[in-house]
Image (tube, coloured by chain):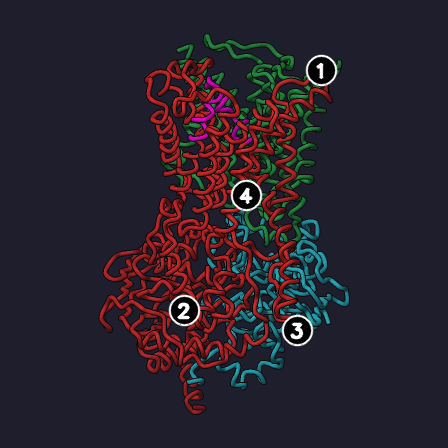
Chain colours: A green, B red, C cyan
Amino acid sequence: MIDFLQLTVAGLSQGSVYALLAVGLIATYTVRHVVNIAQGDYATLAGLGSISLVTAGLPLPVAILIALISVTLASVLIERLVIARVKNLTTLVSIILTLGVSTLLQAIMLLIWGAEAKRLPAFPGSDVTLGGVSIRSQELWMLGALVVVGGGVLLFYEKTRWGKALRASAEQPVAARIVGISPAVASIIAFAIAGFVGATAGVVSSPIYLSIWSGGLLLGLKGFVAAVLGGLVSFRAAIVGALLLGIIESYVAGYVASGWKDAVAFFILIIVLIIRPAGLVLRPNAVRV
Amino acid sequence: MSYLNKAAMRSKTGFWPNNRGTILGVAAFAVIIAIIPFTASSSMMNIAVFSMIFALPAIGLSLLMGLAGQVSLGQAAFFAIGAYTHAILLQKFEMPGPVAAVGGVVAAMLAALLIGLPMLRLRGHYLALATLGLGFIVMIAVREWEFTGRTTGIYGYGRPEVFGIPIDNNGLFFWFVAPFVLIGLVLALNLTRSRAGRALSAVNDSELAAESLGVNTYALRVKVFTLSAGFAGLGGVFYAYQVQIVSPQVAEFHVSVELLLMVVLGGLGSVWGAVAGAFIVELLSEGLRDLIPAIIPGATGEVQLIGYGLVLILVIILLPGGLYQVVKSAWAAISARIGTRADAAAKPASAVAVDDGSGEVPTRAFGGLPGEAPAGAGLDEVADAAASDAPIPTVSTPVAAGQPILEVSGLTKRYGGVVAVDDVTLTVPAGQIMGLIGPNGAGKTTCFNMITGAIAPTSGTVRFLGEEIQGKKPHVGADAGLTRTFQNLQVFSSTDVVGNVYMGRYRKGRAGILRGMFGLQGREQYAHEEIAHDILDSMRLGDVAGLAAGDLPFGRQRMMEVCRALAAEPALLLLDEPMAGLSGSERELLAQLLRALRDAGLTIVLVEHDVAQVMALADTVAVLDDGVLIAHGDPESVRNDPAVIVAYLGTDAEEAEAELKELEDQS
Amino acid sequence: MTLAVDRLDAGYGKLAILHEVSLSVAPGEIVTVVGSNGAGKTTLLRALNGLIRPTAGTVTIDGVDITGKPTEKMASLGLTHVPENRLCFQTLSVRDNLMLGAWSRGGKGDLAAVLELFPRLQPRLGQAAGTLSGGEQQMVAIGRGLMAAPKAIMLDEPSIGLAPKVVAEIMKVLTELRGRGMAVLLVEQNVRASFGIADRAVVMQRGRVVLEGTPGELVELPEVRNAYLGGAAA
C-alpha cells in the first residue's frame, strides 16, 4: 500500500510536467493549428540553460528566471522566423516543420552541452513524510509549478482581455480580425505561453529527471498524448489526462518493468484514438478553458 | 472531331504514363547503377549501398505523402519490423532467405494495417502522431524483449547468396539490392498514374468531389499506407543483410526523421525525388559527421542532426516542392524555349505554351508536360452554338419512368438547438426533373448534402433505388449511381479538363492498386478517356480538354463539372445551383442538355436559386422554407401557392394575394 | 461620402470576380446591394474589409484611403463588418463577445448603448453566445460591430435563416443607426426586407454593378422582379 501511494506521488509529479507541456501544445494548436513537436525541447533547453548558469555561479532563482525568459523569447523567435514564414500552414506541414525545429534544437543542445544527462541542484525545501509515504520537496515544487503556472494560464484565458482575444482568435479567426485582433500578435502570445510553460516544466523537473539533449521529444509527445485526451482544446481535461498518464506510467514502472514505462503513453494514445476518436475532438476551433 | 485529332490531342495532354520519359529515366538509372561499383571509392560505395537500402522506405513514404496525403513519422518502425522479422526468421528459424524476406515485408504490412485501419478514419495529423507513437513502442519493445535480443539485437545469420555466389562485398550487395529499388520505383511510378493513383490525387484536390464520384478514400488510403510499410519492410530486409546485426538503434526516431527528410527534400509525393533524396541525405549525413567535429572540436554523437533540422526547415519554407519542383521548373523552361522555337518555325503565332515554368499553373497529376492551349478567342462563340445536334452522353435507367428512384422520409437535421431541415418527406419519380427551391437559408443545401451523404441526418431515411443510404459516405450512393455537382466548384485542379471528366468514369472502372502498379490497366484507361473526350465534345468543351482545369473561365468549369458527373452514367443526377455564374447562352445550353437528358430517361434533381429557370425546366417543384417542405407539385400550382409567395417575399398572406394578383395582371 | 468605392477590381488568385465596382454610402444613408448567388456581393465585402486585397481601385472612409489595409486595422479606421453567418465567439459569453467588439478602442465601448438597441441581449449577457437563437446571435454580431463605434457598417445577409418578425426587428435597428448618422451598407438576398428600409439600391451581376437607383425605381424593373419572384419569366 505504501508502495502504491509512493508510486502515485511519483506519477503525479511526473504528470505535472506532462500537464505543463500539454498546456503549451494546446495554446499553439488552438490559435495556429500547429502541433508543435518542439514543445518538449523547450523544457530541455531551459533545464540545460539554467544548469549552465548555476555552474557559472549565478544563484538558482536568478538562473531559473533567466532560463524562463530566454526560452519564452526563443519560442517567440521560432514563431516569427519559422512558423510565420510558411503560407497556408496545415497541421500536417506544421508537424514536419516543427520536427525540423526540434531536430535543430536538439542538435544545438548536443553541440553545446554534450551527450550526457545533467542535473540542476534541487530547489530549497525539505522532504515530507506522510503516513509512511515520503514526498520529496522537488516533487512538491513540480506540483506547485503546475498549480501556479498552469492555473495562471487558465486564469489568463478565462479572465483577461488578452486571454479572451486568444480564444476569439482560435474560434473565429475572421471575426477576431474584424474586431481588430491581430492574428500575428495572437500567435506570438500563444507561442510565448508555450515557451514559458515548457521552460517551467524543464527547470522544475531537472533536479529529479535530469536534462539531456534528446529528452525533449519524448516529453513533448507525452504532453501531446495528454492534450489529445483533452480533445486538443480543453486545458482542464488535458491536465487531468496528464496527471493520469503520469500515474499509470509510474505503476507500470513500479509493477511491470521500468523499461516499458515510456511505451505506455503511446499505447494509451493509440487505444484512445481507436475507441473514441470522435469524442476527443469536441469543437475543433474552440478553446475549452 | 476525327479520331486522328483526338489521338493527337491525347499525345499532348500527357494523360498517359509518360512512358518515354519513364523508360528513359529508368534506363539511365539502371546504367548508373551498373557503373557505380566500378568507379566509386570504398567509402562512397558504402554510402551508395545505404542510399539504395533507404531509397525503399523513402519511396514508400513518398507514396503515402503524395497519394494518401498522409505523413508517417514512424517509417523507421516498419523498417525495423522488416529487419527484425527477417533476421529472426533467418537466425532462430533457419528459414531460407527469400522466405524470411517475404516474412519481413508481410510483418511490416500487417503492422501498418493494424495502425492504419483505425487511424486513417481520423483526419490529417492523427496518423502522423500515431505512427510516431508506434515508432517508440517498437523501439522499446525490441529493447525490452528477450526474444529480440534486447539491446544487443539479433546477429549470427548468414549473408545472402545468389546462384551460389555469396554477396559479401559492397559492390555485389549494391547490385543485389538495385533491381529491387528499380522495380519498386517502376511499380510506384505506375501506381501514381493508375486509376487508384489518379483517384487519390483527386482526393487531395477535393475529397468531397472525389467521394461523390465513388472514390472510397478510406479504403484506398489504408491500402497505400500498407503498401508504403511494405516498401519500408523490404528496406529493412536488406538492411539486416547488410549490417549483419539488427539492434534497437534501427528503430530510433532519427531514422524516421532521416526518411522524412529524404522525401521532403526530394519533393513531396515525387517517387524520383525520394530516390534522389535518399542519396543526398546519405551523402549529407556522412559529410556532416566528418565536417562538424572538424569545426567544433569534441563534438560527438548524432551531430548530423543539425543539418537535418536546418535542411528540413529551409526546404519547407523556401522550397515546398522540393528538388522535384526545381528540376521540373527548369525542364519546363528549357522545353518551352525549345518548343517555342520549333513551333515558331512550323506555325507562327498560333501556338502559345501554357506552362512557362513559372510554377503558377497548378501541377498536373503526376507526369506529362502540359499540352498547348488553343487560342483564347472563340470560347464564347462555341458556348453560343446550339447543342441540339450534339450526341447525348449515355444515361442509365435502372427504374421504369414514373417509379420512385429516390425516397426521402422524415429527413431532419439539427445543429444544437437550430433545426436546419425539419421532417422533409418527398419522392422523386424516375425520368423527371425535380426542382428544389427556397429562400436562402431554407435548408436546400443541407437537404442536398444529406441525400448525397456529405453530412449525416439527425433522423429520417434516404432510400436510393430501394437501398437506405442516409449517413453513409458519399461514395456509397455514388457507386449505386447517384452523382452530384457542387454549388462552390470542386474542380480537380492538379489535372487537366479531360482528367477531371475521366474521374467521373471512376465507378465504371475496376482496376485496383495491384493492377495499377503492374501497369495492367492501359486498355481500360484508354476506353474511359475516349468516353471522357466524347462527353466533352458533346458539351462543346472538346477544344479545352487538354487545359489545366483551374485555368478555364468560371462558366466552363461549371460545365466541366456537369460533364464529370455525366461521365459516371448516373441514374440520378443532383445539381446544386448549376446556373449560378453562367452567362445567358451558357444557361440556355445547359437547360437544353438537361431536357435532352431527361427525355433520354435520366432523373435530375436541381437545387436552384434562379426560380425562373427552375419553373421553366422542372416537371415538379418542391419548396423549402425554414427547413420545412411547404409545397410540392407541378410548377404552375407551386407558383400560385400563397405559402410560397409568403416565404419568398416575407409578407403576410393578404399582401401575398395582392402581389399574386399584380403578377397575374402583368402576365 | 463616408464610404466610397471607386472602380474596385478583386478576386481570388487568378480568378477575377469584381470588375470596376463603384458605389458610395453617405452618412445617415442605407445602401443595399442585391444580386443573385455568385454575383460577387460577398467578395465585395471581403475586398472592402481587407480579407482579400483589391487588384485595382480605391476604398475610402471620409476621404481616407483604406484600400488593401489588413482586416484587423479596419475597425480602428472606422469600418466594421458583420459577416455572413454571424461568426459569434460561441464559447464566450455575450458580454465578452460585445466587449471584444471594442477591441480596437482598447476595450472601452458603450455597452449600454448597444443593449438599448438590443434589449433582448440584456438578460443573456452572461450566457455563452453559442446557446443563443439565430436571431439573438445576429444581434450579438451587429452589437459587436457597433462596439467599435464605426463610421460605416457593412452587413452580409443579416436576415439569413431568421423568422420575418426577427428580420423586421433587425431592419428597424438599421434605420435607427441611420438616424444616428452612420453609413450602412447592406448586402441582402431578402430584397423585400432590404428594399423596405434602403435609401438606395445597387444591383450586381457577374461582378459588376449593373443598376443603381432608389428601391422604388428598381422594384418596378422586370430584371429585379424576375430575379426574385421568378414567376413573371414564365
Between tags 2 and 1, which lies in front?
2
**Residue at disc 3, secondary structure:** strand
Q: Which numbered circle lies on residue B516?
A: none
C128 up-or-down from B87: above or below = below
Quick check: marks 1 and 4 in contact, CB under 8 Å?
no
Q: Which residue is mark 1?
A: A54
Marks 3 and 2, how far apart in space?
A: 52 Å
**Residue at disc 4, secondary structure:** loop
In the picture, residue A267 is in which quadrant? Answer: top left
Marks 3 and 1, how far apart in space?
A: 68 Å
Q: In the image, which residues are magenta?
A: B234-258
Between tags 3 and 4, which lies in front?
4
**What amino acid type should be assigned to the residue bearing mark 1?**
Val
- Asked if one can make out residue A147 in the rendered structure from this viewpoint, the answer is no
Question: Which quadrant of the rendered structure holds the N terminus of chain A?
Answer: top left
Q: Which residue is mark 2?
A: B535
Query: Which of A171 and C8 lies nearest the eye of the viewer?
Result: C8
Task: Please tell me if label 1 and label 4 are on a single chain.
Answer: no
**Residue at disc 1, secondary structure:** helix
- Which residue lies most toward the right here? C63
Locate residue A120, reporting x and y percent. Answer: 64, 15
Disc 2 packing (10 Å; few <14; some 14–19; many ≥20): many
Q: The disc numbered 1 marks a residue on which chain?
A: A
Q: Residue at x 57, y 44 (%)?
A: A167
